[in-house]
């Protein structure tokens, strides 16, 4: 994930100029032979003038004066040196205007003493670390502005070096907060769109169009996830708010827009958006899945049986089952396992996918999910990997029927339509009633993919992260369905996942007899009706 880069100013204590100038550093020019590279008798006044006036070739410098004058006298200071130093034409021949020289008369300017004793000299020597001093070349037209800044005290560097100090050491100047400020370089991005969406005055219709849910539902999700995804502010930057974190994830899932577009909408880095999507999806799976995706208890099962019986006339139906595929980029490993033959034949293009198998109640809310198995697996094979299948093997699905399409096996607890040729009128009538129950699950998956457009096209999510993202989509689907969030007709999406099997996979002879009895009851109790004739 692309994290906004930051950088600190140079570590050399004497290199102030790079902090003052707003342009990239240039290569260091060759040093004059008269200038000592490793020189602890360093004069800050000379550094200022050389940096701002940009003398390409150094001539007489204050270091020479220091070495001849102050260097031989015990206790000499830069104040003594500054009081005798005046810029002359012969000293800096690059300055063409004689009038400008009068402004650089540094007589009576007080400079902090930094060379009072040998201990200070050694400390300064360690700070210099044999680094040659950088130089800059400025046009003479810039000289008046530099002079005015120095005289008015606007130039922080000059003011720090020439201010009165009682410490008498150079380290007291270098350690001031103004000279030790750290800088964080962050690319400026606009988040105007998100600020508008997050405004209380933003229209409810527009918010729902963008995030596929109302503001109240969005607020509930944010409050549920806040303890997990909230981050603290640091000294470097402010943390991204919880609402913005959730919005990045939901908008990405809802629109399927590329990360570059998400970055522009929310004013965040591309990799930051990618990281937020995975973090929020993981939080949704960990915090909300246990609350909103549950196998129903006995009371709810009885309610579901009643609703499905009203719909189809078949008793003991407690769910409708369906399997859909989500296209993926061809994986590097086990590529044949993810090859989707049916999608390849229909689209005339090689397709790879993973499966999402789920059971829904009469309202289209998921009660069981099995996510992430390779697309080459049949419905029956995926079913064997599910928690629902294990629950059935433990005997926890007695007196319960789950309706599936012809791709599922016929068992004691799974009811599928007749698929052989030459069906009787009763069997056709039975199939039509079963198809009404099947449609509940198919419509639920249709709304799932319509609401979260990222599932409609080939996903860019890594294979190992995909189950978390798919699970988050299913959880958000349940939340929206429970809260009655209507889906716009403009978002309608047709599914093409039905697996047609010529003959049913029969796992139990008793299941065959039970299905025939159900079909017979439908006919004789006037529940059956068909358009076959």
Image (cartoon, grey):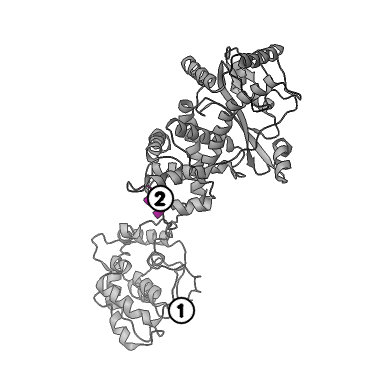
Task: Provide residue 234's location: percent of width, then percent of height.
Answer: 38, 46
Q: Nearer the viewer, residue 48 or 138?
A: 138
* Chief SS of the magenta region: helix
48 relative to 482 in the view: left or right = left
Q: Nearer the viewer, residue 530 or 45?
A: 530
Mark 2 and mark 1: Cα distance apart in space: 51 Å
220 is higher (above) or lower (below) than 507:
below
Task: Provide residue 334's location: percent of width, then percent of height.
Answer: 71, 37
How many numbered marks does the figure carry?
2
Task: Provide residue 505's location: percent of width, then percent of height.
Answer: 72, 21
- Label 2: few (<14), some (14–19) or many (≥20) C-alpha neighbours in 10 Å: some
- Label 1: few (<14), some (14–19) or many (≥20) C-alpha neighbours in 10 Å: some
- Circle on res. 56: 1
Q: Are marks 2 and 1 in contact (CB under 8 Å)?
A: no
473 relative to 126 in the view: left or right = right
Q: Nearer the viewer, mark 2 or mark 1?
A: 2
At 42% from the left edge and 56% from the top edge, which residue is drawn?
190
At 38% from the left edge and 56% from the top edge, which residue is drawn?
182
52 is higher (above) or lower (below) than 287:
below
At 32% from the left edge and 46% from the top edge, which residue is drawn?
200
Q: Is residue 183 magenta?
A: no
At 35% from the left edge and 57% from the top edge, which residue is drawn?
181
Secondary structure under the numbered disc 1 in the rendered image: loop
Q: Which residues are magenta?
A: 192-198
Q: Is there any visible trace of residue 200 in the rendered image?
A: yes
416 relative to 127 in the view: left or right = right
Mark 2 vs mark 1: which is more N-terminal? 1
349 is higher (above) or lower (below) than 502:
below
Task: Provide residue 154's location: percent of width, then percent of height.
Answer: 28, 69
Residue underneath mark 2: 194
């Amino acid at each position: 994930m692309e994290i906004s880069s930051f950088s600190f100013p140079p570590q050399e204590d004497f290199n102030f100029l790079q902090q003052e100038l707003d342009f990239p550093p240039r290569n260091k020019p060759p040093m004059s032979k008269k200038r000592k590279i490793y020189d602890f008798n360093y004069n800050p006044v000379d550094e200022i003038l050389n940096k701002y006036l940009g003398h390409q070739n150094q001539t007489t410098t204050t270091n020479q004066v220091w070495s001849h004058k102050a260097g031989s006298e015990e206790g000499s200071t830069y104040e003594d040196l500054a009081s005798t130093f005046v810029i002359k034409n012969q000293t800096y021949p690059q300055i063409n205007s004689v009038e400008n020289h009068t402004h650089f008369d540094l007589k009576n300017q007080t400079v902090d003493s930094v060379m009072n004793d040998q201990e200070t000299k050694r400390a300064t020597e360690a700070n210099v670390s044999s680094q040659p001093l950088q130089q800059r070349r400025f046009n003479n037209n810039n000289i008046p502005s530099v002079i005015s800044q120095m005289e008015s005290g606007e130039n922080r560097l000059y003011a720090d070096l020439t201010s009165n100090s009682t410490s008498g050491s150079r380290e007291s100047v270098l350690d001031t907060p103004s000279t030790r400020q750290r800088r964080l370089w962050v690319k400026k991005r606009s988040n105007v769109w998100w600020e508008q969406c997050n405004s209380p005055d933003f229209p409810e219709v527009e918010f729902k169009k963008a995030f596929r849910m109302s503001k109240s539902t969005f607020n509930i999700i944010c409050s549920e996830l806040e303890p997990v995804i909230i981050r603290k502010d640091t000294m470097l930057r402010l943390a991204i708010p919880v609402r913005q974190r959730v919005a990045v994830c939901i908008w990405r899932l809802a629109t399927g827009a590329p990360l570059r577009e998400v970055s522009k909408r929310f004013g965040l880095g591309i990799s930051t958006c990618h990281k937020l999507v995975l973090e929020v999806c993981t939080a949704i799976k960990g915090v909300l899945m246990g609350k909103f995706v549950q196998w129903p208890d006995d009371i709810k099962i009885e309610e579901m049986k009643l609703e499905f019986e009203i719909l189809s006339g078949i008793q003991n139906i407690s769910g409708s089952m369906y399997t859909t595929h989500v296209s993926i980029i061809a994986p590097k490993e086990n590529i044949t396992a993810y090859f989707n033959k049916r999608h390849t034949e229909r689209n005339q293009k090689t397709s790879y996918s993973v499966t999402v198998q789920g059971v829904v109640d009469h309202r289209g809310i998921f009660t069981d999910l099995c996510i992430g198995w390779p697309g080459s697996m049949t419905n029956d094979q995926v079913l064997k990997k599910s928690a629902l299948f294990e629950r059935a093997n433990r005997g926890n699905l007695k007196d319960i029927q789950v309706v599936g399409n012809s791709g599922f096996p016929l068992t004691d607890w799974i009811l599928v339509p007749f698929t052989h040729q030459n069906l009787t009128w009763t069997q056709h009538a039975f199939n039509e009633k079963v198809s009404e129950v099947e449609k509940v699950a198919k419509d639920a998956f249709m709304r799932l993919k319509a609401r979260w457009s990222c599932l409609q096209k080939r996903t860019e999510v890594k294979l190992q992260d995909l189950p978390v993202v798919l699970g988050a989509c299913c959880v958000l689907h349940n939340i929206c369905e429970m809260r009655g969030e209507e889906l716009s007709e403009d978002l309608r999406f047709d599914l093409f996942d039905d697996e047609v099997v010529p003959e049913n996979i029969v796992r139990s002879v008793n299941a065959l007899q039970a299905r025939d009895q159900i079909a017979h009851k439908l006919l004789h109790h006037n529940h059956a009706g068909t358009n076959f004739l």
